[in-house]
Amino acid sequence: MVGIIDEAQLFYPLGTRIKIGSNYGTVKYVGEVSGHAGTWLGIEWDDGMRGKHNGIVDGKRYFQTQLPTAGSFIRPGKLGPCATLEDQARDRYLNYDSSNVDASLIRAAQASVQASLFEVVGMDKIARKQSKFEQLLEVSVDETPVNAAGYLKDLTQLTTLNVSHTLIWNWEIVASITEQLPMLNNLNLRYASAHLQHLATFYNYICNCSSNRLVLPTEAEISKLEPAFRQLKHINLRNCGFADWKEVMQTALLWPDIQSLGLQENSLSQLSEVDCNRIFRQLRELDLHRTKLMDFDQVCKLGNISTLQMLNLMENGIEQLQLPDCEPQCKLNLFVSLEQLNLLHNPIWNEAEAFNELDKLPQLKRINMSPHLKSNFDEMFSKAVASIAGLQFVNKAKVTDEERRGAEYDIWKKNAVDWLQATKLGADALREFYKKHRTYLMIVNKYGSPADFVPRIQTKQSNLIKVRIQHQPSGEIWEKKVPRMITVQTLQGLVMKRFRLSGETPQLCYVDAKRPELVVPLENNAKTLDFYSVQEHDTVLVQ
């Protein structure tokens, strides 16, 4: 019996990943079970409902599981055979038939022509490209029983490797793969349970190692294995079971010069400052999508990563952004290279306050964010452009010079009363005003004092305003009293009737009577003139 147990422990050391059917698990115990003959493997299943207990049988604990029904015992003989990366790659890319073309290449072909599977032609050509084994640049063996490297001498041109949802379970196995692939720079170790596979993201293409729960490397293993990862630039560890940021930092010692790191769907609600002399020395992109980072103070602990250019914080439940305090006309020495921030699908309740905080970042040029329920994209866009100096894109929409002028002009007039009151109260009050409206001094320097707007803002406004409507092609001018709440669409209809226009609806913009150098497009047909701050005696241009 001892010999049988020793053999099982040799083939299934603790931490080994196993698969039965569509269910994945981790070996937590190898040995005898009281009252049951033979050798057993104690398994903690990824699906917490797959097992029968928590590692305790008949009052005796054999192993520990995180969930009460995640554990069970199985016979070693019940497990299917494992495979090497070499064998699975050859099987997938050399033993070709019409149904065996790599799904990742099919997706790439579909995307390139925007076609469905049945519209893609030339699959034989793709297959022939795959079958030139020694010329392969990208290999995917996801959802296969790979748990070892094999002999990879014919894959030395490989640059991208997807080993997600395989049975790789420790960094020694990963190192035995990477050290044989001198050109490899994109590695995907993502873990994706069956019900999560539809959530694949950009990182799945770059480097797929997810679906693997990797044992934390020891200091001795890090020292030994680190040279095998020096060529890597991108690594994806999505949903790999990290629950402690310290574990991430320890693992990162294996690849201290990584440039792109995916940690999506790991439960990392608490972070800590990293030692950038030891890890993340060249990190440019960090994906923390859906990691339970609800507190933005935790995110700020990563602000000393001076090389970081892109940060993804999608779907983390963040409600408020609060950065460290700094003087109104200064920038923080925090996230000094950050150009792109993704905050999509976070319930941020005060957009204006959030954008004012983000203006403290010295290089921010792109932001992705979902409008508040009481807002819409146009309003959010205007607030962001006016509040973050140097912003160039909002949700992939490029900020034009006209849009920037319009947004700045709106905030210039909107905050005129508060600004004037602050100037009367003295330097301290004005400083507090500028802290809440960081770009306002720049806007005042750009457009002048907004004091002229204060009297008419404070005076009770009439429901009607008199505007000059100029038909630019003919030069004809029409002076007309219109309701402040008239929509752009209704005004377009009046204009077409008055100037006897036919065909396409004319585009409108307006020139402020007091600031004639400012031309504001009336782009949204559903908005009112009041929304665009059109005032008495302003000129509407018909283009």
Image (cartoon, helix red, strand yellow):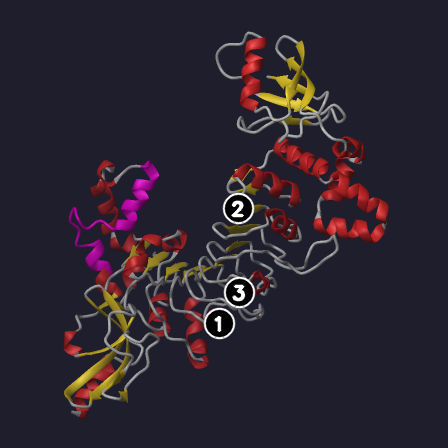
Q: Is residue 181 found left or right of 447 in the rendered image?
A: left
Q: Secondary structure at mark 2?
A: loop
Q: Is residue 164 found left or right of 243 in the rendered image?
A: left
Give me the residue at 63% from left, 56% from top.
Answer: 336
- x, y percentage for residue 424? 85, 45
Of the numbered discs 2 and 3, the one sitting upstream in the chain is 3
Which region is colored magenta?
Answer: 89-114
Q: Marks 2 and 3: CB-CB under 8 Å?
A: no
Give me the residue at 32% from left, 45% from top.
Answer: 108
Q: Is residue 169 found left or right of 407 in the rendered image?
A: left
Q: Amino acid at mark 1?
A: Leu
Q: How many marks?
A: 3
Q: Secondary structure at mark 3?
A: loop
Distance Cα–Cα, label 2 vs label 1: 40 Å
- x, y percentage for residue 8? 21, 83
Give me the residue at 77% from left, 43% from top.
Answer: 419
Residue identifier under label 1:
253
Above or below 417: residue 183: below
- x, y percentage for residue 85? 26, 64
Residue 150 in sight: no
Of the numbered discs 2 and 1, the one sitting upstream in the chain is 1
Quadrant of res 227: bottom left
* Extreme-bottom residue of the structure: 2
Quadrant of res 408: top right
Question: Quadrant location of the N terminus?
Answer: bottom left
Give me the residue at 78% from left, 39% from top.
Answer: 445
Residue identifier under label 2:
372
Q: Amino acid at mark 2?
A: His
Residue identifier under label 3:
280
Decide which of 334, 411 is in the foreground and name it: 411
Q: Amino acid at mark 3?
A: Phe
